[in-house]
Image (cartoon, helix red, strand yellow):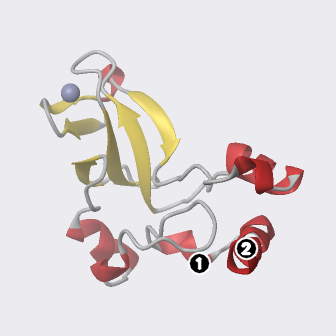
Amino acid sequence: MLIIPCPWCGDRDESEFKYGGEAHIERPLDPDALTDEAWADFLFMRRNTKGPFLERWMHAAGCRRWFNLARDTATNQVFGAYRIGERAPAAYWDAVGQPAEKNGKTPPGWRVVTGGAAEATPAAEVALAARKVSA
Ligand SMILES: [Zn+2]
């Protein structure tokens, strides 16, 4: 059983929540400027991390608010929950072995650096970054 700490309601059973996928995905500022491949990458391609991961959840049977949860997908260890716009808890950064000051920095593309697999940048993001620099 997974107990999720809603930032507004406190600890609740997983059955009260709806999973929302990977956290910290930013919508491209100019979608019309994207290639079909880059748009498809933004829409459909998400990490499938085994280990510490930042994900979105919604408290469907409670306050109905969205928030982010730092969780180990292999062990279900919860590092902490945080509201949209806040930074991931320090326990998460300790688990991924990266300094917390990387948190919140925006790399090229639409993913905010969240640790772990963030350095694996799909080719479409690199192409988008090149386009932004030349524009
Ligand atoms: Zn709640």
Left or right: residue 46 compared with residue 26: right
Is residue 103 shown left or right of residue 4?
right
Quadrant position of the N terminus in the picture: top left
- Label 1, on which residue? 119
Q: Secondary structure at mark 1?
A: helix
Sort mark 1 into few (<14), some (14-19) or many (20+) by Cα contacts within 10 Å: few
Check the picture and name the quadrant holding the C terminus: bottom right
Residue 13 screen position, x and y as percent: 25, 27
Q: Furthest residue to the front?
A: 135
Q: Quadrant of ligand 1?
A: top left
Q: Residues within 10 Å of mark 2 (few under 14, many from 20)?
A: few
Q: Earlier in the sequence, mark 1 or mark 2?
A: 1
Left or right, residue 122 beside residue 81: right
Q: Residue at x 54, y 60 (%)?
A: 50
Residue 50 disc label? none
Mark 2: which amino acid?
Ala
Q: Position of residue 76 (x, y in %)?
A: 36, 49
Residue at horizontal 35 percent and vertical 26 percent from the top: 17
Query: Can you tell which quarter of the image residue 91 is in?
Result: bottom left
Q: Residue 64: x percent and y percent?
A: 29, 21
Callouts 1 and 2 close, C-beta under 8 Å: no
Q: Is residue 25 above or below residue 52?
A: above
The kind of residue tagged 1 is Glu
* Residue topped by disc 2: 135
Residue at the limit of the structure toward the top, as seen here: 61
Residue at the spot x=69%, y=72% of the render?
132
Q: Nearer the viewer, residue 25 or 77?
A: 25
Mark-to-mark CA distance, 1 and 2:
24 Å
Of the two numbered discs 1 and 2 in the rendering, the one whose residue sits closer to the viewer: 2
Image coordinates for residue 14, horizontal then vertical, percent: 32, 29
Name the residue: 44% across, 67% down: 114
